[in-house]
Amino acid sequence: MSGGAAAWIGRGGLALLGAALLAVPFVLPELGYGFWVNIVTEILIWSLLAASVNLLFGYVGLLSFGQALFFGFGMYGATLAVIHWEAGFWTGLLAGTLAATAMAAVAGALAVRLTWHYFAIITVVFSLIFYFAAMSNKTLTGGDDGLSFSAPAVFDMAGVTVTLADPLAQYFSVLGVVAACYAIMGVVVRSPLGLAFAAVRENDRRARLIGIDVYRTRLVAFVLAGALAGVSGALFAFFGRYASASYMVYHVSGEAVVWAIVGGIGTLLGPLFGTALLIVFRELVSTVWENYLFAVGGLTVLVVMFAPLGLAGLWRGALGRLTAPRAAPAEAPADPVAPSADARAVPGGR
Amino acid sequence: MEPAIALETRGLTKRFGGLVAVDGVSFSLRSGRVNAIIGPNGAGKTTLFNLVTGELRPDDGEVLAAGVPITGLPPHRIVREGVSRTLQIKSVFGGLTVADNVRAAVMAHQGIRSAFRPAASYRAVGERVDALIDEVGLARHRDRKASALSYGDVALLELALALAAEPKLLLLDEPVCGMGPEETERAVARIRAVASKVDVVIIEHDMEVVFSLASHIVVMASGAILAEGTPDEISRDPRVQEAYLGAPEDDE
Ligand SMILES: Nc1ncnc2c1ncn2[C@@H]1O[C@H](COP(=O)(O)OP(=O)(O)OP(=O)(O)O)[C@@H](O)[C@H]1O
Ligand SMILES: [Mg+2]
């Protein structure tokens, strides 16, 4: 069947992507593009923040403009653990993730009582409060200037110490963590919990009437998304060896929303492609034009206008046409995680 | 012995601002027969269902399902007490396939919430899903998205979602509204089959459907009970005729 063929092409594409990512730190420097290894690393890290927006918006139907808050908690959790407890990479990552998760549990307990624009507004309010708190509490956070630290160990055993200063160790640590996050997300969205997410996104009233605790389901998603954003923030702290309150500002949240939408809401890897496209575009254009943000905005508008389901939607459409040339194109493949357009167009009324 | 009671309300009241949508409604609907609630538009029938299923909180009064007080419980808890419903405006999960619609409902009912196993890998759930889809006659559409179904099929899917919770009491809000004659006939047959196993309370404007299904009828007008009795008694009641003639009727 064509669905099978599409699945195989999809798997092939995934394998190709994996191989390309594994080859990056070996091939790009050979070609004289060593600098781009860092860009790819940055894309991987930021894509998790976009993935966290996508988990909420694409899978449960909640649009958050405050994910930078949890990014910031991940960043500071990791940084403070390194500075005060001499934590290594993994402990710092854990500390950052836990800090973000705890914050998400607290913020979520309030925020997910609301839906649609009320929800979006409260996420902004939360992140603003903590942004200003972090900016003014210079002794703890370093405020705008931030806190810096030197590259911690990734591996320290049997007398062998490898730190993040080793470019390969840094790249593969980040790639490993990011790949694990996507793998976990892939499992979760296909699970019974993921199906409950989809039910809540599609129709929260009907979800209640089949016995789903909508509040709890949204809260679980919110905490998971907070954890993802926390991992992203912790990785970014390790990548830059510093944390700054300036990353908790709502521009950062907004950018993540744009990356997720451009990449394709409600698809697992869409946020990765959206983030990649816009960061690469920014790198290319910013060297030749200082008002490159206009170009980024223009590109975003183009994608949203001509590919409302994002890059992932384009890819699916192409796959569909390739593998089913004579079938009606309207019927999307049976995919429990693909949201319907109308589910997101209407407010989640109560 | 007293006959078993499927649904009882005591002085149930709901106000919207100055409007009393449900006004001190008390009734006892017996188990083992189809009960119908009829009444002109705006009589408060749907609001009454909303009070029973916990989607609205009553300002006053009590609801008991099979003798168990359920007043004030949230909707997802009331489903667990064995009360399911369909909505006047048919309501399913549009972006999901028919099978996933039903799967979500079966899993919610069975309390399956794992985050790690693929939802499609639960064998027993899958069998239950297929049985429910067969029961409402949607096997042909199993893998189609719900948003691609015809109106009548959406109504049948919604019925499957309601049945997935293995309810003792099923509330149907205008189940044949908007259907053509053929779809209506199909739906009525399904409802009759379901009613042999589950207590059914039906809100319906189509009198032919009401009279063919129900053996007990409650008539509501302006939030209150106007009359109650067998179809025969109701059809002869002058107050009922007046209520229907006095208010504009859009069906028939
Ligand atoms: N959420 C609400 N807020 C305010 N008023 C409401 C609300 N729900 C219902 N009403 C009002 O309460 C009254 C009863 O409405 P309800 O929907 O229960 O009537 P109904 O008997 O189901 O009518 P129909 O046969 O048209 O479906 C109407 O006047 C309606 O406008
Ligand atoms: Mg109604």
Image (cartoon, helix red, strand yellow):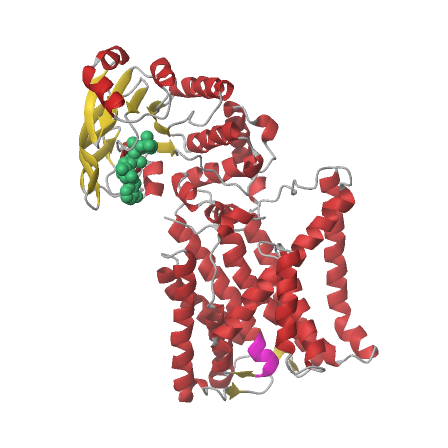
| Residue depicted at x 43% and y 52% | A347
Ligand 2 placement by image quarter: top left
Of B39 and A1, nearer the camera is B39
Does residue B155 appear to the left or right of B240 in the view shown? right
Where is residue A198 shown, x and y percent of the image?
51, 47
| Residue depicted at x 58% and y 83% | A241
Please, what is the dominant secondary structure of the magenta stretch? Answer: helix
Does residue A328 appear to the left or right of A251 in the view shown? right
Where is residue B218 shown, x and y percent of the image?
25, 22
State which quadrant residue A153 falls in: bottom right
Task: Judge whether residue A288 is colored magenta.
Answer: no
State which quadrant residue B148 falls in: top right
Does residue A86 appear to the left or right of B201 in the view shown? right
Residue B47 visible here: no
Look at the picture and state if B121 lies above or below B2.
below
| Residue depicted at x 28% and y 20% | B31
**Magenta-drawn segment:** A236-241
Where is residue A147 shown, x and y percent of the image?
50, 87
Of B189 and A137, nearer the camera is B189
Where is residue B44 shown, x and y percent of the image?
26, 33
| Residue depicted at x 55% and y 87% | A149
